[in-house]
Image (tube, grey):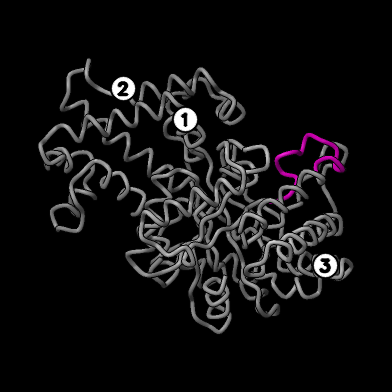
Amino acid sequence: MKALLDIVARHRSGQPVGIASICSAHPVVLDAALIHAHENGRPVLIEATSNQVNQFGGYTGMRPADFHAFVMDRADRAGLAREQVLLGGDHLGPNAWQDEAAAAAMAKADTLIDDYVAAGFRKIHLDCSMACADDAPVLRDTEVAARAARLAAVAERAWRRSGGAAPVYIVGTEVPVPGGAKEELDELQVTHPEAMAATVEAHRRAFAAQGLDEAWQRVIGIVVQPGVEFDHHDVVDFKPEKARALSAAIEQFPGLVYEAHSTDYQTPDALAALVRGHFAILKVGPGVTYALRETLWALSAIEDEMLPASKRSGLRDVVLGVMRAEPKYWNKYYTDGSRLTLDLQYSLSDRVRYYWAHPQIQEACAALLRNLDAISPTGALPLALLGQYLPRQYEDVRAGRLTNSAANLLRAGVTHVLRQYAQACAQTL
């Protein structure tokens, strides 16, 4: 974790530097991040959430050790040294088991934390902010902090048992809704500095009560609400003037920075302003998989132009068919039937990301790439169609910065988003 600690130390010394936290398990997204890091000689921070990856497999089917092996294998293929790959766990706590009693949910959270740390994850977001089935609707800071400290003790035991670098911790309540808001938003309330300070103090005391004073020195960040969010079709942009007091308040806590969630779809200027405001860790998830879907749709349109219907992959129809047949990942989010087809494809919450591992969709994606590779002897796609459907990639191909192949064009769609984060963080990711 030396690279991450160095970024935090440089930030606290006055340098406006930060790092993007890439929260995705999609292989194309991971490859884009790992290859970009290799090309630029910098570390990359990749995180899994408790819903994506847990001891029961999560929605990816992977346990923590599986995800670690999956990422490291792809790092090897990308030529990136494993020491340059920082792995984190996000929302680690009872989040995946909120419908159970607190005792049962926290027992599962204990196992979750142990598995993550034992597997080699070293950036741990302790998130116990959610109420379980037998809790009051809103938990007190002291209860949230006590549960987080309990999990920190589990993490410390797992680290001492497994060895390696000591884990670092992120604390604080997740204010932005994971994956984007369900309803339309106009503006958000920025966290009050007093509330932030109370959260830090509650966690410090809870760590001390568990005899974790040394571990508390490795708490490097706190999650707050800087005033950023997105719903299905709109983005609430960061306004630095509204977060000025919050940005100043963290300066009284040496060694701490803010971690900003739901920064997806922020403009490059807004991302840079977040970093200057001490939001040194910028999480992005749906934003990169949205870019993936956007590029796949463009490649599918090129396929439609080049091939008769009988030979096409039909990717869009396959994806929509699977989503309609298996609505469990979107039916609580997309409730307006009049725009369901629009939301399924284009909602910024990007519920499509839960379906890429479906066997039918994987085969359709593979068929699309095979079809496009076979269009010409070299696998290059017609420049005229790149200009029509993928103008950004067209410019890079023409300038010699990008090899014209379907796989490279797809990865470049994701890399564009990652590059915006790297530039905002004042370093090459």
Amino acid type, residue under disc 1 in the picture = Asp
Nearest to N terminus: mark 1 or mark 2: 2
From the viewer's side, name the closer residue of 369 and 249: 369
167 is within the stretch colored magenta: no
Residue 139, compared with residue 303, is above or below; it is: below
Q: Secondary structure at mark 1?
A: helix
Cα separation between marks 3 and 1:
43 Å
Residue 418 x, y percent position in the rendering = 40, 57
Span highlighted in magenta in the image: 92-105
Q: Residue at x 72, y 53 (%)?
A: 114
Q: Is residue 424 left or right of residue 305?
A: right
Residue in the picture at 10% in, 37% down? 377
> Left or right of 48: which side holds 35?
left
Nearer to us of marks 1 and 2 is: 2
**Location of mark 3 (residue):** 207
For residue 314, the mark is 2
Marks 1/2 in contact by CB < 8 Å: the verdict is: no
The answer to whether the residue labelled 3 contacts the one labelled 1, judged by CB atoms less than 8 Å apart, is no
**Residue 315 found in image quarter:** top left
